[in-house]
Image (cartoon, helix red, strand yellow):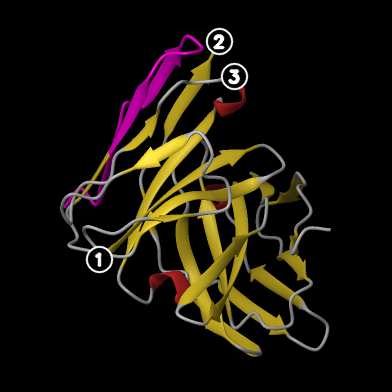
Amino acid sequence: QKEVEQDPGPLSVPEGAIVSLNCTYSNSAFQYFMWYRQYSRKGPELLMYTYSSGNKEDGRFTAQVDKSSKYISLFIRDSQPSDSATYLCAMSVRMDSSYKLIFGSGTRLLVRP
Amino acid sequence: IAGITQAPTSQILAAGRRMTLRCTQDMRHNAMYWYRQDLGLGLRLIHYSNTAGTTGKGEVPDGYSVSRANTDDFPLTLASAVPSQTSVYFCASSDSLGFLTGELFFGEGSRLTVL
C-alpha cells in the first residue's frame, strides 16, 4: 500500500465549477501537507502548505486537512481553464535528524471553457 | 532570476552509455534534490544534498550518482544507462527547512529516453 494515495483522474469540470481534489494517507505522523500544481511539460510549483489540521485559504484555493481521517483536500473556487493541470499532494514528517517528504502521483484536472 | 536550470531538456540515449544531467540554481539554497517522475508512480527521490560537500541517497538511488562541489550545481550521473531509467528527471532546491514544509523549487525537467 502506498503511503499517499491520489486518484489520477482525469477530472473534467466546466469553467466556474468548484473543484475538490483529495488525497488519503496512511502514516499518522505526517505533519506538513502541501499541494503542488504541475502544468504539462513543466516542473511542479508549490501552491500552498498547511501544518497539522484545519483550513488554509489563498485566493480561490482552500487546503483542508483532516488528520483524524488521514484525508486532505484542495478546493478550487470559480475554476478557470488556466487551472487545467496536474495537482500533486505531498506530505512530510521529521524523522530524527532528517525529513521524509512523500508525493502523491497526481490528479489531472481539465477545466472546460 | 532563472531559479533552477536543467540541461538537457530532452535526450535519447543508447543503453550502456554514460549520461550526466546538469542542474544549476541561483537562489543560494542549501539543499538540492533529484527526483524522477513516472506515470502512476509520482515523484520519487533519487539523491539529495543538504549542503555543499554532502550527499545522501533517496528512495531510488541505484544506478545514479551525484556530487555537490559547490552551492549552485548538483549534477546527476547515470554511469551505464538502462531502459528502466527512461523517465522525466526533476532537479529541485530549497532552504534548510524546505524538505519539511515542502517549499521546494523545481526545474523544468529533463526528459530522458534510454533505448
Rendered image: mark on residue B115:
2
What residue does disc 3 label? B83
Q: Pointer 2 and pointer 1: residues touching (CB < 8 Å)?
A: no
Where, quadrant-wise, is the C terminus of chain B in this rendering?
top right
Above or below for B26 versus B87: below
Rendered image: mark on residue B30:
1
**Same chain for the residues under marks 3 and 2 in the image:** yes
What residue appears at the point 79 percent right and 53 percent down from the top-left corner?
A7
Dot 3, how many residues are within 10 Å of its Cα: few (below 14), some (14-19), or many (20+)? Answer: some
Q: Pointer 3 and pointer 1: residues touching (CB < 8 Å)?
A: no
Secondary structure beneath label 2? loop
Q: Pointer 3 and pointer 2: residues touching (CB < 8 Å)?
A: yes
Rendered image: mark on residue B67:
none
Magenta span = B1-22
Residue B66 appears anywhere in the view: yes
Q: Amino acid at mark 2?
A: Leu
Q: Amino acid at mark 3?
A: Pro
A67 and A86: which is toward the camera: A67
Q: Amino acid at mark 1?
A: Asn
Q: Earlier in the sequence, mark 3 or mark 1?
A: 1
Above or below for B87 versus A84: above
Q: Earlier in the sequence, mark 2 or mark 1?
A: 1
Q: Across the whole image, how many numbered discs are drawn on residues?
A: 3
Q: Earlier in the sequence, mark 3 or mark 2?
A: 3
For marks 2 and 1, give the CA distance.
35 Å
Horizontal side of residue B25 vs A14, given as left or right: left
What residue appears at the point 74 percent right and 64 percent down from the top-left corner?
A3
Secondary structure beneath label 1? loop
Horizontal side of residue B5 vs A63, given as left or right: left
